[in-house]
Amino acid sequence: MKLLIVTVVEEYAKETLQLFKKANIESFSGSDIDGYKNPAQVLMASNWFPSEKGGVESAMFFSFTSEENIDILFELILSFNNKLETNNPIRAAVVPIEKYI
């Protein structure tokens, strides 16, 4: 069992969920997040009354799943990212789990 973490700009959230389904990852959680690419955006967003929104609307998904499902998902993500014309690929990371209940 491993912890899979995936981040994506909101524009590709629905496609990411379809990739989860194709990889047989049916149990997962998600959350809306703001994505940042440079420290200036973070500083602007930390003001009490910023003049503009600092981050990019994004989503984060995570799942405790098997390595087999993760391997399938990574292949699907690679294929998806290779076809993108933007600089906002789906990002994924895997964290090993030592113990769980």
Image (cartoon, grey):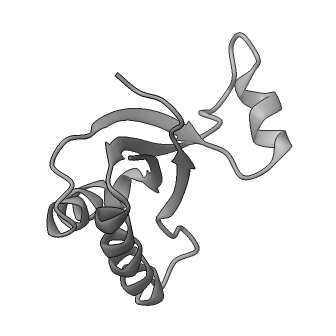
Residue 23 vertical position relative to residue 86 in the rendered view, above or below:
above
User: What residue appears at the point 51 percent right and 70 percent down from the top-left corner?
Assistant: 89
Residue 11 point in image, percent of width and height? 35, 58
Q: Residue at x 41, y 72 (%)?
A: 74
Instruction: Decide: is 20 above or below 83.
Output: above
In the visual, does 53 lie left or right of 81? right
x, y percentage for residue 97?
51, 39
Q: Quadrant of residue 16?
A: bottom left
Toward the top, the furthest residue is: 48
Q: Position of residue 80 (x, y in %)?
A: 37, 81
In the rendered image, residue 81, in percent from the top left (x then y), is placed at 45, 80
Query: Is 76 left, or right, of 23 in this rendering?
Result: right
Residue 67 to residue 40: above or below: below
- Depth check, front residue: 10 or 98: 98
Residue name at image x 22 percent, y 56 percent: 17
Quadrant of the drawing holding the C terminus: top left
Residue occupying the point 16% across, 61% down: 24
Q: Is residue 36 left or right of residue 26?
A: right
